[in-house]
Amino acid sequence: MIPMKSDSAWRGTSDCRQCGIRDMALFADLNEHDFGLMHAPIDDLEYAHGETLYAEASLSQGIYTLRSGMVKLVRSTVDGRPRIVRVLRPGDVIGLEALAGARYDSDAVALTPVAVCRIPLNVIQKLASRSPRLHTQLMSKWQRALKDADDWLADMNFGTARQRVANLVLKMRSPSNHEVSVLFSREDMGSMLDLKFETVSREVSRLVRDGVMEQLDKQGRMYRVLKPEALSAP
């Protein structure tokens, strides 16, 4: 296959030059020579709330960078129950396990409407082998993803119901504005925290009633954190 010119490869069907999360995304440190190695375009895709980007155990075809929205990673427990193991936000890389195995190890499902860039696996493999910068960045993101997954499990699966919900509120604060926390459906929160729907709803309502946070929208997805110290209290 004839290599694409660097400008064409850079654009693909996604305009990486104009990407709002360019500095956070996977290709932040690449130069024009690196992109001259590409043989396939980067796909610019959108998914509606509830749509699946890929399924657990499906053949891995590429990795994704999340431009907007939130994506949940879901695995099945031994008894067949779905369990959210991590929530990804803009700038995160989805499906890094594709670099080491032939199949994805979880379902990736849109928690909200999302926009992603899908990078073919052969592009990543070629760039990683020829660009020390990307190889180093891939390893760094992989290690960070593993640590984040461990942190999610540690923070979300221990303590009282109130502590679990409080930890989630803290973790879901906007990176650009720590006063605002963006949550999701109570069913999804329960799946992540290993709590019943009713328990999650009760604890969220209690935090609002106690003045720890205030609801900003009708759907109960956005909250302003008024007393972060109360959320951190044991």
Image: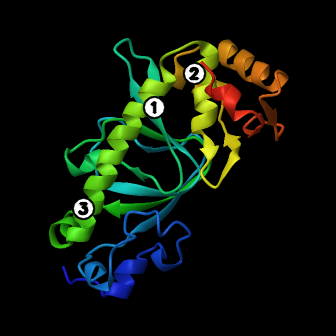
For mark 3, does the 10 Å Cα neighbourhood hold few (<14), some (14 to 19), or many (20 or more) residues? few
Q: Amino acid at mark 3?
A: Thr
Residue at 38% across / 86% down in the picture?
Answer: 7
Any part of residue 176 in sight? yes
SS assignment at label 3: helix
Q: CA distance from mark 1 to mark 2?
A: 11 Å
Q: Which residue is mark 1?
A: 152
Rate crowding at label 2 as few (under 14), some (14 to 19) or many (20 or more) other CA atoms within 10 Å.
many
Q: Is residue 13 left or right of residue 229?
A: left
Callout 2: SS = helix
Question: In this rendering, is residue 88 above or below 81?
Answer: below
Point out residue 198 in the picture as x, y percentages from the top left corner: 69, 13
What's the image's color scheme? rainbow
| Residue named by callout 3 | 136
Residue 37 percent across, percent down from the top left: 23, 79
Instruction: Pick whichever, 59 or 23, lies toward us.
Output: 23
Determine contact: label 3, label 2, CB under 8 Å.
no
Q: Position of residue 51 (x, y in %)?
A: 53, 43
Q: Compute the Cα span from label 1 to label 3.
A: 24 Å
Residue 196 visible: no
Q: Residue at x 43, y 63 (%)?
A: 25
Report the amino acid beneath label 1: Trp
Return the residue at label 2: 164
The mark nearer the N terminus, 1 or 2, is 1
Q: Tag 1, which secondary structure?
A: helix
